Amino acid sequence: MRQCLPSGKIRVFTGQRRPNCNSEHMPAPLPPSVMYLSGKLTLDTQQALLRDLVQIIEVAPFFSPTMPRTGKPFSVRMTNCGPLGWVSDRGGYRYQPHHPVTGRPWPAIPSILLDLWHRLSGYPAPPEACLVNYYDTTAKMGSHQDRDEEDFEAPVLSVSLGDTAVFHVGGVTRSGPKARIRLASGDVLLLAGESRLAFHGIDRILGGSSTLLAPPVFPAGGRLNLTLRRVTKPK
Ligand SMILES: O=C(O)CCC(=O)C(=O)O
Ligand SMILES: [Mn+2]
């Protein structure tokens, strides 16, 4: 696995800067106001966050979201924590306060994530949803915008754990150049400002690139991505 820097060293890349060692097939600069914090979480913090997530998954197990029109299941499995959670099924994309299978409220967002939001988001109110995506080594996510929230003033803050993912991000139209970066365990990325509605997605997972997700909870390894979102405008 190629690495930009020894673990524990943080580098920040914002719009118009691109780390060469992370470039994929279509070189393009990171769009303005995408903030990429490589190596932001130490291994200790990643492990502590993973312990919190294992407890969350016990209460709110992963479910398989489906496409609204076709009913086709996503390759990614999902759960949430926070007052609201994002779901997708025949009824469409939406946020709701309860798990679609168990009917129970989502568990609370771990303090590690709330602290990160308060330090990095520049937004005066807490996140209301943390979408937790689990990717096995064959899963991917097509290009999309995160636009089911009322308030685009708040950024979307993403944390990656486990196997590295090839992430693409472009502009606010589906076509057009995309930057590709490798999101490794402990990396944090914010879609903010002009890039809040940027198209983005996951091309592939580099299976076996991390040992963080391990049996018995994750027998096939893989990757977790957590995205913190503010859904409603603060009163
Ligand atoms: O897995 C990722 O890094 C991106 C996830 C994402 O875009 C989403 O859940 O909306
Ligand atoms: Mn997204």
Image (tube, rainbow, N blue to C red):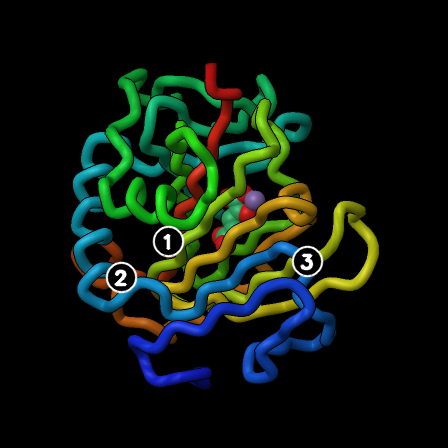
**Does label 1 or label 3 sit earlier along the sequence?**
3
**Does label 2 or label 3 sit earlier along the sequence?**
3
Tag 1 and tag 2, C-beta contact below 8 Å:
yes
Distance, label 2 to label 3, CA atoms, is 32 Å
Q: Mark 3 packing: few (<14 Cα in 10 Å), some, or many (20+)?
A: some
**Amino acid bearing label 3:** Pro
Tell me the residue at 34%/59% (across/down). Answer: 161
Mark carried by residue 224: 1
Does residue 134 show up? no
Image x and y of residue 207, in percent = 42, 70
Q: Secondary structure at mark 2?
A: loop
- The reply, left or right, for residue 13 in relation to residue 176 is left
The total of numbered circles placed on residues is: 3
Q: Which residue is mark 2?
A: 213
In the rendered image, which quarter is residue 209 located in?
Answer: bottom left
Distance, label 1 to label 2, CA atoms, is 8 Å
Q: Quadrant of the N terminus?
A: bottom left
Q: Mark 1 packing: few (<14 Cα in 10 Å), some, or many (20+)?
A: many
Distance, label 1 to label 3, CA atoms, is 26 Å
Mark carried by residue 132: none
